Image (spheres, grey):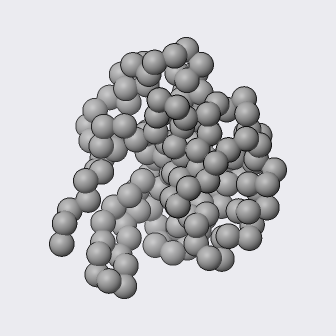
Amino acid sequence: MADAKTKPTAADVGTFLAAIDGEQQRADAASLTEIMSRMTGRSPVLWGGSIVGFGRYHYKYASGHEGDSCLVGFSPRKAEFSIYLTGIYFPDSKAPAEAMLAKLGKHKIGKACLYVKRLADIDIAVLSELIALSVTRLKQEYGEVI
């Protein structure tokens, strides 16, 4: 079975955030870091080369595939932020998440990510609710997180 490619690193998150192009995107990344740190009670860790993650949980699928992932996180991509809220994709989280997403503001949703161009386009209180839902659901599914 292949190892996960995206793993936590010892790289300095502050250095990574300071190197983000564009003053607004750097400011939004700093805000996301503060929000996610506060919501999870965890410090940021750089996963792979471009994901700022908070907390860690261990998953194991029925197929036998298992690994670790960040509880929540984001990646400041060139065009938009990818925000990782895996817990909102569980079937029992779908209806509450859809209601929240309807109030979030300008965003796109992918198979495993929420995409936002800038934080000014969304309601931060709703984003915080989505983060809380995701964290709660992952803890229910996988137990205590690191």
Q: Is residue 102 visible?
A: yes
Residue at point 72%, 29% (across, down): 120
Question: Image check: 76 left or right of 6?
Answer: right
Residue at point 73%, 41% (across, down): 106
Res. 90 image quadrant: bottom right
Question: Image check: 19 left or right of 118?
Answer: left
* The N terminus, quarter of image: bottom left
Res. 2 image quadrant: bottom left
Question: Image check: 19 left or right of 136?
Answer: left
Count the numbered circles shown.
0
Residue 130: x and y in percent read: 67, 54
Residue 121: x and y in percent read: 73, 33
Q: Nearer the viewer, residue 56 or 100?
A: 100
Res. 66 image quadrant: bottom left
Seen in the picture, residue 33 relative to 95 is either above or below; the reply is above
| Furthest residue toward top | 23
Residue at point 30%, 43% (across, down): 48
Residue at point 28%, 32% (across, down): 11
Seen in the picture, residue 19 relative to 116 is either above or below; the reply is above
Q: Is residue 131 visible?
A: no
Residue 109: x and y in percent read: 61, 53
* The C terminus, quarter of image: bottom left
Seen in the picture, residue 110 relative to 31 is either above or below; the reply is below
